[in-house]
Amino acid sequence: MPTTSSASSPRPPPRVFDGAVKTDASSRPTAAASSSSDRRVVFGTLSSARARAPRAAARLAPPRRRPATSSSATKSALFAPDAAVDVNGVDLDAFERFVCEMQTSVCADLEAIDGSDAARFTTDAWTRDGAGSGFGVTRVLEGGDVFEKAAANVSIIRGELSPARAAAMRRVHIDPAGGQKYAAAALSLVFHPTSPMVPTFRADVRRFAVEGAGDGWYGGGADLTPYYLYEDDAREFHASWRELCDAHDPSTGGLGGALHARCKRWCDEYFYIPARGEHRGVGGIFFDDMEAGGSPESDADPEAFTRAVAKNWIASYAPIVKRRRGERYGDVEERWHHQRRGRYVEFNLLYDRGVKFGLDGGRVESIMVSAPPRVRWDYNVAPEKGSREENLVEVLRNPRCW
C-alpha cells in the first residue's frame, strides 16, 4: 500500500522503556508531516512517548449461567384478542422473557469483567405508543476500567402490519393488505473497550412473529471488530461459534458444518462497507429469518439455536478481553483505534438495516447507543507498509476461514 514520504527532519531512534518501544512525540506521523504530494496520515508500529501502562487488571469472574428456559413453553396470550399492547398489560411469552433475563445476566457478567468500582450499567426504561406499541430497556455502562462504553438494549413491540410492511415480507400466511398482529422482540449488545488492543464485540438475537404465520422468524449473531489483529484470538472466537453451530446443525448430524459455513459467510457478506472495500471486522456468525424447516441448513428448532447463541456471547468474548486488557499502547495506537471506529459508525449509518429502519420513526437514543464515544475521520489515512495496521486492513479486505 502506498505510504507517505517522511517529514523533512529525520525520525529519532526508538527508545526502549519497560520492554515497549517508544519514540518522541515529535516523531509521530501526522497529516502535516506528510508530503504535499501525498497527504496521508501514516500509522506505524512504534508506540509514542506517552505510552501508558494498563489499568490494574481486575479478577475476571467466570460467566454466570442461568437455567435454560424451555423453547416449547406456551406463548402466553401473545396474540390474544383482549391482550393489552402497552407495558402495563402486555403478557410476555417465553422468548420475550428470555431476552429480558439475558440482558440482566449479560450486564452482570460485563460488570464483573470490567472490574470497575464505580462504573455500573444505568437503566433507561421506555414505552412506545402508536401503531407499534411496546416497551424497552436500554442499559449503558460508561467510563469503566476496560470498557469505555457498553450497551445492552431490549425492545418488545406489538402492533399491526401496515400494508407496506406486509407487502415487503412476501411470505406465506402474510396478508399483503396488512392488518395482522405482529410481535417483535430483540436484545442487542455492543461493547467498546478503551484499549485498541481489545476488540469491539457486537451481538444480537431477535424474533418477529405474525399472527397465523407459525412460530415466527429468528435472527441474531455475534461478531468481532479488532483494531490490532491477534490471530489466535480470531481463531478461538470462530472456533467457539463453529462448535455451537455444529451442535445445532440438522443437515449432517452436526458433522458437516453447513450451518456454521452459512452463518459465517452471511456475517462476512452483511458486515461489509462497499465504499471502503472493507469488512467491518473479522466476522463471526449472522443469521436472519430462520424458521423451522425453512432450508436444509435451518435448525430443527430455530428458537433453541437462537437462545444458544445468546448464551455463548460472554463465553466467546471474555477470554479475549482477559488476555488483551493488559497490553501496552500509546498515542499512535489510540489514534488508529479512533480512526477505525469511524468505519464502525459508517457501517451503522449507511448500511445496517436495523439502524436505518429504526431511525425512521424509532427511538433515536436506543438506536445510536451502539455508537463508540470517541471517533476520528482524519483525511486520506493509510497504514504504513509492513505495519500491524496494514496487516489488519489486508485481513478486512480479504476475509479468512479462521
Image: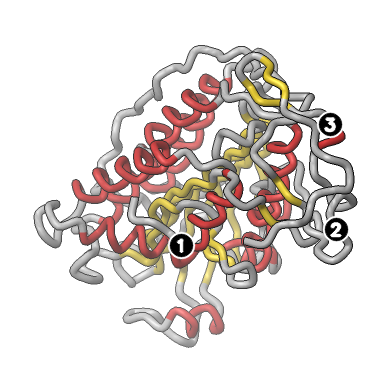
Q: Are marks 3 and 1 in contact (CB under 8 Å)?
A: no
Q: Residues within 10 Å of mark 3 (few under 14, many from 20)?
A: few
* First in sequence: mark 3 vs mark 1: 3
Judging depth in this view, the residue of 281 and 9 nearest the camera is 9
Q: Residue at x 44, y 48 (%)?
A: 222
Q: Nearer the viewer, mark 2 or mark 1?
A: 2
Judging depth in this view, the residue of 195 and 159 nearest the camera is 195
Q: Which residue of the protein is positioned furthest toward the left in this rendering?
A: 253
At mark 3, the secondary structure is helix
Judging depth in this view, the residue of 75 and 146 nearest the camera is 146
From the image, which quarter does the N terminus lie in?
bottom right
Q: Nearer the viewer, mark 3 or mark 1?
A: 3
Check disc 3 and report the residue beneath it.
25
| Residue 125 pos. (x, y %) | 65, 40
Q: How many marks?
A: 3
Check disc 1 and report the residue beneath it.
398
Residue 35 — which label?
2
Three-letter amino acid code at the position of disc 3: Ala
Three-letter amino acid code at the position of disc 1: Asn
In the image, taking residue 26 as reference, residue 91 lies left or right, namely left
Three-letter amino acid code at the position of disc 2: Ser
